[in-house]
Amino acid sequence: MNPNKPYLVDAIIGNSTLLASMGRTGRMYRLWWPNIDTPQHVDAMRTGLQLEDGRITWFDADQDGWKHECSYLDRSNVLRVTANAAGEAIAVDSLHFAVPESNLLVRQYTFTNTGEQAASFHFLLHSSFLISENGLYNTTMFNPEADALIHFRSGYFFAVSSANVCAKYQAGLSWEQVQNGELNGNRIDMRPDGALSWSVRELAPGASVTIPVYVAAGRNEEQALEELAGARSKPSEQLAALTNEYWHNFVNNAAPCPIDRPDIKEVYERSILMFKLMSDEKTGSIIAAPEFDEQFSRCGGYSYCWGRDAAFITTALDKAGLSELSDRFYAWTLTAQSPDGSWQQRHYHDGGLAPSWGLQIDEGASILWGMWQHYIEKQDQAFAKLVWPAVERGAAFLLSFMDESTGLPKPSIDLWEEREASHTYSSAAVYGGLTAAASFAELLGEATLAAACRNTAARIAKAIKDDCWNEDRGSFYRGLNLKVGADKYAEAKAAGLEGHIEELDKGYVKHVLKHDPIIDISLIGVSVPFGAVAAESDQMRRTADAIEAALTVPGVGGIKRYEDDIYIGGNPWILTTLWLAHYRIATGDLDAARKLLDWAIEHRTETGLLPEQIDKVTGETAWVVPLTWSHAMFVLTIFMLAEAEAKISAASN
């Protein structure tokens, strides 16, 4: 597998069936099909020019003097990349997009002679497919009738070709071998790579020629070639125009941006477009981000569906007028619920359990809360009846997970997936899930369950206010009954902190500290969005102020997750900064919220996407592009801000 794939990418393209991640040089790093989370098929695809003197220059790289500009076309998921190099007579202008409702990716290259003499060259494409990220049993072959390279393995076929007839080809050509530019006409090889080249002769000064590259997918060779033939039935310019029109209509059919400010509108529309790409067409699941760390070398992976993230995301989708995507997601949740009524940490597109660190009680609770938010938006009785059996089982699981001695949910893994405790945020999420379940139960005449949910939720809220408050720090504790290692437990006990040792099965023990005093942005969730404690209460105001004081990053600004965060260096996050903005809006401090919102906008990427983290030293993008939850928090922020501004305006009139 290619070891040089970057963690950070600059753009994504797709159509909710195909998804590809791109660099700003126009290099495609990854391609998912027929679902957007898995499997991933591309090892590497490279594009270059072989000039008359035999020299090869790869214009999809920052080498040989090539400089690039990268941006999406206006209100579209079509990506444009330009490449120019001093001393080179050929400039490259390319468009990259997936055709809607197809299994076709298009990469359209227009070459312009910027020199004073006629120019001849070959456009060279090297493609390597490790299908399903598996290095075994891949085959590459050239189909002369279709003039296409076919990459295939075990039910996945990709036809790579053009509307232009190639001049040379080779199946089975490694990256090291392609450097000499000699393609020997080998037609089939049980290696994953190959190459095509197209000849351009005597391109006049100022003239241009367009050569599209098609990547057509199918379950067999016939399907892939049929998709390829469909691509060739129209000029690539027409495919680009049709794709642009599709995305323009998608944006036009969404809710308009609620705030009349160009930069806000730009990020809002980019968020709408990105949401569609992160929603799987076939299943309705929503992924956190396109995968970028296949080897789990720095994290546990992101190309999965988290119920927690999705609850925030679907609430944003509803605000943005994209309720159909929310409908499809909540239909999907019915396939992902475990037999005991829980929803586990994260899932694949088919609802199957993805790699996990264990139960996070806030995941299922957030799904129940999100379902009710979706009902409030649509007022659709049919939706309530559809999800009710899952709500009933989900509520029963939450009720069974309560610790009667504390009035809080039993310990589980926290939302950052790092520690076990009865987390205050998770408890608030369970409060939100139970109140949502009670609302559904009351709607459908299930009074007994409604009462049980409301009573338990009230106990949670009381326990949070009474037992999770840390007066010394003027903030809620992050949690109670925190599991720690034996060394940390000994240090804490020596310092006079409360704790105990629990006996487990087979002679194992667990070391537990009574309190987790770390200040964490997730404590905002106690009031916004879950409402376990009123936003206007003294406890929440002091907690929010403590969060801002402790977690604002000096110099760069923004809010990090918690005090001793070390993940990817402990940087400020977009979503955490906007979470504090949500609280400031809820309590009427709109100026503070606008400053936090402006910080997030200022730290979008070159292509207008919102990352997860911003480097605490340089202020540059640090991790995960794009993060769907970041975009959701942005959309929620601007709608909350617009609604608050409207109330102030109405009150003043």
Image (cartoon, rainbow, N blue to C red):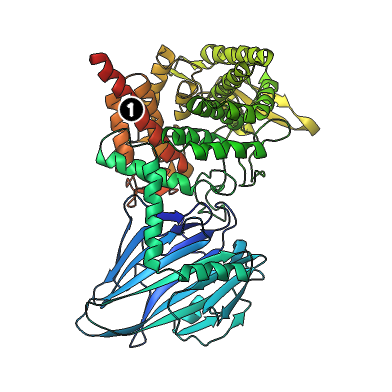
Furthest residue to the front? 233
Q: Position of residue 620 (x, y in %)?
A: 34, 48
Q: Residue 145 lies in what quarter of the image?
A: bottom right
Q: Residue 554 lies in what quarter of the image?
A: top left
Residue sitting at 63 percent across and 77 percent down?
A: 190
Furthest residue to the right? 506
- The reply, left or right, for residue 583 in relation to residue 484 is left
- The reply, left or right, for residue 277 in relation to residue 55 is right
Q: Is residue 583 above or below residue 236?
A: above
Q: Position of residue 83 (x, y in %)?
A: 31, 68
Furthest residue to the left? 116
Q: Position of residue 434 (x, y in %)?
A: 60, 20
* Residue neighbourhood size for the residue with mark 1, other residues' Cα within 10 Å, grouped as few (<14), some (14–19), many (≥20): many
User: Which element is circle 1 on?
Assistant: helix
Query: How many tags in the picture?
Result: 1
Could you say which is closer to the camera, residue 394 or residue 557?
A: 394
Q: Mark 1 highlights which residue?
A: 641
Residue sitting at 54 percent across and 27 percent down?
A: 380
Could you say which is closer to the camera, residue 445 or residue 66?
A: 445
Q: Position of residue 583 (x, y in %)?
A: 39, 24
Residue sitting at 30 percent across and 39 percent down?
A: 264
Residue 9 visible? The answer is no
Residue 230 visible? The answer is yes
- The reply, left or right, for residue 471 in relation to residue 643 is right
Q: Quadrant of the N terminus?
A: bottom right
Could you say which is closer to the camera, residue 357 or residue 368?
A: 368
Q: Amino acid at mark 1?
A: Leu
Q: Quadrant of the C terminus?
A: top left
